[in-house]
């Protein structure tokens, strides 16, 4: 019986379990050995020499020294960026100051006379 005939004979709900069965059979044909297990229990050899340590959540201080570290870390990072930002800001301000002065000059009577335009 084909899967199409099975679908029309028994309905769509029986086809789901048939597909699941076919999927498991196909997986085993392809060399899989079935369900491997959850993380930490994958069916491999037992691990030796692994030491784990734990501390009670009541003994931990997750925010110990956060305010002090944040202030000093922020100051250190900002002062480290001053040479880069300062140079760019200085160049930008120099261009802005020159352009403003040039604009004011060109709008003045002396600027009109210097550029040769008559308004």
Image (spheres, rainbow, N blue to C red):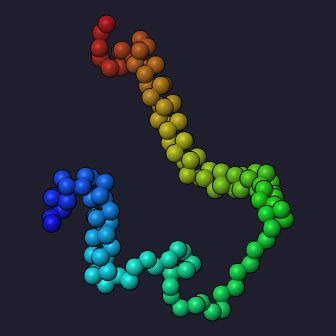
Look at 32% across and 80% down and name the residue there.
28
Look at 50% across and 42% down and name the residue there.
91
**Image position, residue 78 (x, y; %):** 65, 51
**Image position, residue 42 (x, y; %):** 51, 81
Look at 32% across and 62% down and name the residue there.
17
**Image position, residue 93 (x, y; %):** 53, 36
Picture layout, residue 45 above or below residue 28: below
Picture layout, residue 86 above or below residue 24: above
Q: Quadrant of the C terminus?
A: top left
Quarter location, residue 26 = bottom left
Quarter location, residue 40 = bottom right
Q: Residue furthest front?
A: 9
Left or right: 92 in relation to 46: left
Picture layout, residue 82 above or below residue 98: below
Total numbered circles: 0
Left or right: 61 in relation to 94: right
Look at 66% across and 92% down and name the residue there.
49
Q: Residue furthest top?
A: 119
Q: Quadrant of the N terminus?
A: bottom left
Residue 72: in sight, yes or no? no
Nearer to me, 20 or 109: 20
Left or right: 18 in relation to 41: left
Nearer to me, 73 or 45: 45
Residue 87: in sight, yes or no? yes
Nearer to me, 67 or 18: 18
Picture layout, residue 60 above or below residue 12: below
């Amino acid at each position: 019986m084909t899967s199409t005939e099975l679908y029309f004979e028994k309905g769509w709900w029986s086809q789901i379990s048939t597909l699941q069965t076919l999927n498991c059979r196909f997986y085993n044909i392809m060399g899989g050995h079935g369900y491997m297990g959850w993380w930490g229990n994958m069916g491999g050899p037992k691990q030796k020499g692994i030491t784990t340590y734990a501390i009670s959540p009541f003994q931990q201080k997750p925010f110990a020294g956060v305010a002090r570290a944040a202030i000093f870390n922020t100051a250190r990072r900002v002062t480290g960026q001053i040479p880069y930002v300062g140079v760019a800001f200085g160049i930008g301000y120099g261009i802005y100051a020159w352009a403003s002065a040039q604009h004011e000059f060109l709008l003045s009577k002396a600027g009109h006379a210097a550029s040769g335009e008559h308004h």
